[in-house]
Amino acid sequence: IHCPASDSFWTVMSMIKIWYPMYAVIAALLIWRLGWKKGLLAILFVALAIFFSERLNNLIKYMVETVRPCNDEGRIAAGIHILENGGGWSFPSGHSNNCFTFALSTILCFRAEILGIGKPQTGHSLRKRRISRGVKAWYAVYAVFITLWASLVAISRIMVARHFLLDIIAGSIIGIALGLLTGKLFLLCCSKF
């Protein structure tokens, strides 16, 4: 499974700062697709979701205190392939938690456009409100892309020896739940205004 090319790929997928430009593009897309007010509101909801995701993740880590694979003496002695060293606790995976929180909350925020609660209707769009196939296709492509991205980041945490499988499963489940909650709250908030 390990070779220089795959090791480099998994290491890059695990880096947090490399994804900042993607976050900025998605923030700009939220504003563009939903209008500036609802776009900024969506960004606020997503940022709050990530904030609470981090807090919950750290709370669980310090309650459970599972040693990371890269710090497990037995695994090191057995020859585990380590790409990243580091301290802290393993369970649950913060990367998985945050990525799935981001993915699901942004998917549902973009869904506001399909539900007709995006940009205010003006001009030619006042006719009959029908969502074009292009918008639905764009939404589907985004949903697949961002879910695949979150999944690859989660898998990368195992491949760099920072987490066990159970860590990323738990982190992903927590992230999905928080993302769904955030997205649903955003849609509810948007439908009221």
Image (cartoon, rainbow, N blue to C red):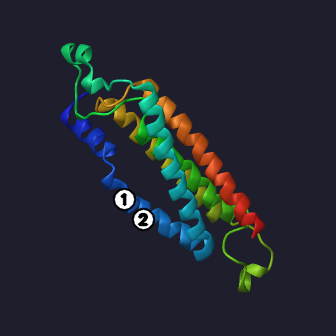
Classify mark 2: helix, strand or loop: helix
- Is 66 placed above or below 122 here? above
Q: Quadrant of residue 67?
A: top left
Residue placed at 29% from the left, 29% from the top? 161
* Image disc number at residue 159: none
Measured in 3D between alpha carbons, the distance from the residue under mark 1 to the one under mark 2, in whole angstroms, is: 6 Å
Name the residue at the bottom extreme: 123
Q: Is residue 153 left or right of residue 18?
A: right
Label number found at residue 20: 1
User: Are dots 1 and 2 in contact, CB under 8 Å?
Assistant: yes
Q: Quadrant of residue 14?
A: top left
Residue 79 x, y percent position in the rendering: 20, 17
Q: Nearer the viewer, residue 191 or 147?
A: 191
How many numbered dots are placed on residues in this image? Answer: 2
**Residue 22 picture quarter:** bottom left
Query: In which quadrant will I find the N terminus?
Result: top left
Counting from the top left corner in percent of width and height, residue 182 is at 62, 52
- In the image, 87 versus 177, the foreground residue is 87
Query: Element at badge 1?
Result: helix
Q: Is residue 109 visible?
A: yes
Q: Mark 2 Cα within 10 Å, few/some/many (few <14, many 20+)? A: few
Which quarter of the figure is the C terminus placed in? bottom right
Q: Position of residue 107 (x, y in %)?
A: 59, 54
Q: Amino acid at mark 2?
A: Ala
Q: Residue furthest right?
A: 128
Residue located at (22% from left, 13% from top):
78
**Which x, y percent locates residue 59?**
47, 37
Front one among 156 and 127: 156
The disc label shown at residue 24, or none = 2
Q: Taking 174 as reference, is 142 above or below it? A: below
Q: Amino acid at mark 1?
A: Tyr
